[in-house]
Image (cartoon, rainbow, N blue to C red):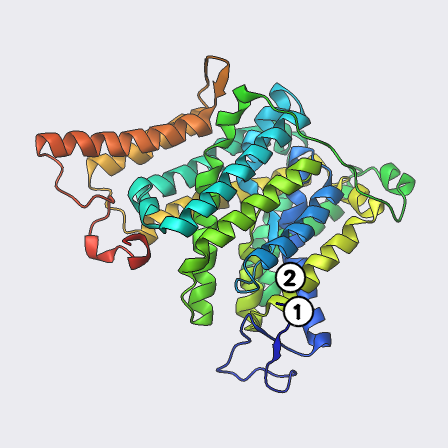
């Protein structure tokens, strides 16, 4: 498992060649590429604990451990870094406000276990049922509503606290995205955070006292989960997002390496769920496969899993400095407000892109109602408490998307008014074979 064949001379990659997951370059180059992966994941990975109040150093530690666990479970066949998942921000924030950090960790832990069990199911029976239960119109709606549900909260808690800094941070991210290509363009959010941080520093919004008091070396801060059954429904919709992210990640890597990796979806789901559960057990943020690192692989044409072992070990090393965690925690609300406006918007756009990629036909009333009602419920952040369970806008929007689509489809079949394809697309022939199995 820990043996990689040397690609060519180990120093160069031909213009028409790629370095496969089971290959590596010379170790100095592999270490350098691993460092790029650390840079690519760092910005988004530390933002989640800063936004949710989880300890950044603990999150960094378990993102590194989770990555190594992922590589082990997938037998070094799927190159990926497991960074912090933004899909969990809304349920974590709601759980922390309603109860405590421990209750939020309990919800994350249960979600991780359920995702791991889902991975075992997929490994056994395949992915065909996913497309039938959650066709593109449903899955896209669920992903989009999570991003849209978060915006009011970040405006109240972050953006409005320092609107000038937040606006300048937002502009910096947009300019970095427009002006830079390659790696800088792909980490425009991190560059924007640095620029926003400098602006906040000039405006006197940063307090370095905790950094001066922190030690250079030491173990991260650990917390343990508590369990409140009434809060668990808030977390369940996140499984849909993680499912979509993992399937998308495996498909993307398979396309770029010229290999069919669909048989690995079950393993990636199990690995992601196990890593999330492990992280939550000790106070770290939930994990997911990172698109930022796909960008690095695309730019370098190096898909070697050896580079990810380097990145995981580097993250573990950085996590053992409390001073690094204290520095991350000094990021002020204004900077977070500007960044989260972009990130939450991008989450919604991912959902909309699923509609486009899935060729969803919005001339069909069932698709209009599925997406429209689900999004409005999430934006309004409707709440419903019953039997000790609290359902928020994300959970209710998810249930609405599933119930409306399948309910209207069922009524249409009984009355003979629904004659379109079962997945809500405009053309059945466009459905990928991966979801028709």
Spot the residue most to the bottom: 9
Image location (x, y in percent) of residue 358: 31, 51
Residue lying at the far top of the rendered structure: 387
**Mark count:** 2
Residue at 36% x, 31% y: name it: 374
- Seen from the viewer's position, the closer of residues 53 and 75 is 75
Q: Is residue 126 above or below residue 225?
A: below
SS label for mark 1: helix
Residue 167 screen position, x and y as percent: 61, 41
Position of 430 with respect to 139 (left or right) is: left
* Residue 372 seen in this snapshot: no
Residue 28 lies in quadrant: bottom right
- Pinpoint residue 272: horizontal percent, then vertical percent: 55, 48
Q: Which residue is mark 1?
A: 33
Quadrant (top left, top right, bottom left, bottom right) of the N terminus: bottom right
Label 1 neighbourhood size at 10 Å, few (<14), some (14-19), many (20+)? many
Q: Viewed as shown, does residue 146 lie left or right of 318?
A: left
- Is the residue 289 above or below the residue 112 in the image? below
Q: CA distance from mark 1 to mark 2?
A: 6 Å
* Residue highlighted by disc 2: 37
**Which residue sits at x=91%, y=39%?**
213
Q: Which residue is at the far left?
A: 416
What residue is drawn where x is 66% and y is 69%? 33
Assess disc 2: are there few (<14), some (14-19) or many (≥20) residues with their C-alpha within 10 Å of its C-alpha. many
**Within the image, what quadrant is residue 139 found in?**
top left
Give the label on residue 243, or none.
none
Q: Are marks 1 and 2 in contact (CB under 8 Å)?
A: yes
Residue 281: x and y in percent read 67, 36
Taking 344 as reference, is 424 left or right?
left
């Amino acid at each position: 498992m820990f043996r990689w064949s040397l690609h060519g001379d180990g120093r160069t990659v031909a213009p028409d060649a790629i370095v496969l997951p089971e290959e590596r370059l010379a170790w100095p180059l592999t270490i350098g590429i691993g460092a790029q992966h650390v840079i690519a994941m760092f910005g988004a990975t530390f933002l989640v604990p800063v936004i949710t109040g989880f300890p950044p150093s603990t999150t960094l530690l378990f993102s590194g451990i989770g990555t190594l666990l992922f590589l082990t479970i997938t037998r070094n066949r799927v190159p990926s870094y497991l960074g912090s998942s933004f899909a969990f921000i809304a349920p974590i924030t709601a759980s922390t406000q309603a109860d405590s950090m421990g209750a939020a960790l309990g919800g994350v832990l249960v979600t991780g276990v359920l995702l791991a069990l889902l991975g075992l199911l997929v490994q056994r029976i395949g992915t065909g049922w996913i497309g039938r239960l959650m066709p593109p119109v449903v899955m896209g709606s669920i992903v989009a509503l999570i991003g849209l549900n978060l915006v009011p909260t970040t405006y109240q808690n972050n953006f409005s606290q320092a609107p000038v800094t937040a606006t300048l941070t937002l502009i910096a991210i947009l300019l970095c995205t427009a002006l830079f290509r390659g790696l800088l363009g792909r980490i425009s959010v991190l560059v924007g955070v640095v620029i926003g941080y400098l602006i906040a520093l000039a405006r006197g919004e940063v307090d370095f006292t905790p950094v001066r008091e922190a030690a250079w070396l030491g173990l991260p801060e650990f917390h343990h989960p508590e369990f409140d059954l009434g809060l668990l429904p808030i977390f369940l919709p996140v499984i849909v997002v993680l499912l979509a992210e993992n399937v998308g990640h495996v498909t993307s890597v398979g396309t770029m390496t010229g290999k069919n990796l669909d048989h690995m979806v079950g393993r990636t789901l199990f690995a992601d769920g196990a890593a999330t559960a492990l992280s939550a057990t000790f106070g770290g943020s939930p994990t997911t496969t990172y698109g930022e690192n796909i960008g690095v692989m695309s730019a370098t044409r190096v898909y070697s899993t050896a580079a990810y072992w380097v990145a995981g070990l580097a993250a573990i090393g950085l996590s053992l400095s409390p001073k690094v965690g204290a520095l991350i925690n000094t990021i002020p609300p204004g900077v977070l407000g500007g960044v989260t406006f972009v990130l939450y918007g991008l989450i919604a756009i991912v959902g909309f892109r699923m509609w486009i990629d899935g060729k969803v036909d919005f001339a069909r009333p069932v698709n209009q109602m599925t997406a429209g009602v689900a999004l409005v419920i999430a934006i309004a952040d409707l709440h419903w408490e019953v039997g000790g369970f609290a359902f928020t806008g994300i959970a209710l929007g998810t249930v609405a998307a599933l119930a409306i689509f399948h309910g209207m489809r069922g009524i249409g079949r009984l009355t003979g008014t629904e004659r379109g394809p079962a997945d809500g697309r405009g053309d059945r022939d466009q459905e990928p074979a991966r979801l028709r199995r």
